[in-house]
Amino acid sequence: MTALWWAVIVSGLYHGLNPSMGWPLAVSAALMERERSAMLRALAALAFGHFLAMTAILLPFSLMTILVQWERAIRIGAGILVIGLGIYLLINRRHPRFLARVPPSRLALWSFLAATAHGAGLMLVPIFLGICGPSFQDAGHLAAGKLMAGNVITAFLVATVHTAAMTLAGGLIAVVIYFWLGLKFISKTWFNLDVVWALSLILVGAFGVYSAGPL
């Protein structure tokens, strides 16, 4: 259980470090408006959109009463789905074009769409199901209601912890770039995280399948 919660936090930190999740937009907002507060507003909008993307994926799973009877099968299926998305992103390196059509003023919407398109929310599903997995004593219809209510709370908690970690990591990078390193540092040291992102999806999916137990 501790390892699963650490996975929620670490994946959040990783999402925050990934430029695809939006921290360069926070730096751009501060530079364009020439106000430090613009960075905070941008980070808050990005965090809100990311949180909505996480809950949009996790809540449907938390409301499934069938989770009690088919918890292990669903965990394995979710892990395989995440692995498949990782393999797809390894093959297809192009970023979704529709993200470029979202106005810069709608950062929350952009963050929601970016997190959804890159599978950020889907990455949490195998971890979330592992945290919410019922014990042997909870099996049965009587436990379904308690499990469902508890999982809704857990879904919001997972999304909150993950988003907080993402915002912390992305915010720290944005602050360092804005106040000390500058945009030239990005152009000189830029490296593509797309392959790392795809591999991380495969790794998390494999971990979800492994944690569900032997096939």
Image (cartoon, rainbow, N blue to C red):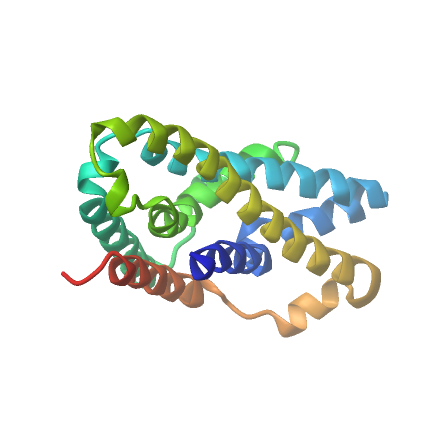
Residue 158 percent coordinates (x, y): 49, 44
Q: Residue drawn at (25%, 56%), measured in percent from left and top?
A: 212
At x 77% / y 57%, what residue is drawn? 175
- Which one is nearer the viewer's eye here, 215 or 21? 215
Name the residue nearer the viewer: 150 or 79: 150
Residue that lies at the very extreme toward the bottom in this rendered image: 189
Q: Quadrant of the N terminus?
A: bottom left
Residue 133 lies left or right of residue 109; in this view the side is left
Looking at the image, residue 206 lies above or below residue 188? above
Viewer can see residue 94: yes
Q: Would you identify the image quadrant in which residue 45 lies?
A: top right
Q: Could you say where residue 15 lies in the image, as x and y percent from the top left?
A: 53, 55
Task: State which quarter of the image contains the C terminus.
Answer: bottom left
Please indicate whether residue 26 sits to the left or right of residue 10 in the image. Answer: right
Quadrant in the rendering for residue 202: bottom left
Q: Residue at x 41, y 67 (%)?
A: 195
x, y percentage for residue 197? 43, 62
Seen from the viewer's position, the closer of residues 94 and 37 is 37
